[in-house]
Amino acid sequence: MTRDARQPDGLPRPSFPYSPVVFGGGLVWTSGQVAVDATGGVVSGGIAEQTRRVLHNVEACLAAAGCTMDDVVKVTAFLADLGDFAAFNAEYAAAFAEPRPARSTVQAGLAAGLLVEIEAVAVVPG
């Protein structure tokens, strides 16, 4: 399988050794996306604002590989506090049409100021 990686438009270049999105063999994998803007700064606000930004970043990764949110088949979400689950879920539900992707959601220790991280797997259309 040949694989490719691209830098999504509007996202900062990683400062660590990883690719934001890798694709090949008809599949796309995003690295865990967090609530950072194009400058690398954490967006202000709570779980709703951060979830919207994270989903925007996931969408940018998918677009770099020729996919959309409709092509996502599996999501793993990491929440700093499971007490934020309901607010997270409301934003998440708005981002994905039925049938929604399979999903795992776990509580995790995230970097300071980050409330949510999401990684996704998609199938390349066609």
Image (spheres, rainbow, N blue to C red):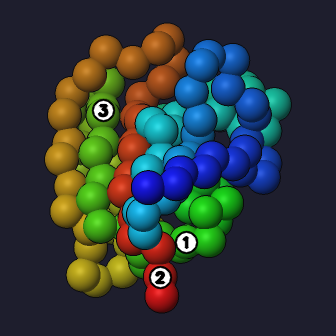
In this rendering, position of residue 55 left or right of residue 64 = left
| Snapshot quadrant of residue 89 | bottom left
**Earlier along the polypeptide chain: callout 2 or callout 3?**
3
Mark 3: give few (<14), some (14-19) or many (20+) Cα within 10 Å: many
Q: Which amino acid does label 3 sit on?
A: Leu
Q: Is mark 3 on a helix, strand or loop?
A: strand
Q: How far apart are marks 3 and 1 (CA)?
A: 25 Å
Q: Would you name the residue on which mark 3 appears?
A: 79
- In the rendered image, residue 46, in percent from the top left (x then y), is placed at 49, 35
| Snapshot quadrant of residue 94 | bottom left
In this rendering, position of residue 117 left or right of residue 23 = left
- Residue in the foreground of this view, choosing between 110 and 67: 67
Q: Is mark 2 on a helix, strand or loop?
A: loop
Q: Would you name the residue on which mark 2 appears?
A: 125
Which disc is residue 19 wearing? none
Q: Which amino acid does label 1 sit on?
A: Cys
Q: Would you name the residue on which mark 1 appears?
A: 67
Mark 2: give few (<14), some (14-19) or many (20+) Cα within 10 Å: few
Q: Is residue 101 above or below residue 53?
A: below
Q: In the image, which is nearer the foreground, mark 2 or mark 3?
A: 2
**Earlier along the polypeptide chain: callout 2 or callout 1?**
1
**Earlier along the polypeptide chain: callout 3 or callout 1?**
1
Q: Is mark 1 on a helix, strand or loop?
A: loop
Tell me if I can see residue 87 in this picture.
no
Q: In this view, does 52 lie above or below 94?
A: above
Identify which residue is drawn at 19% across, 34% down.
106
- In the rendered image, residue 91, in percent from the top left (x then y), is placed at 41, 59
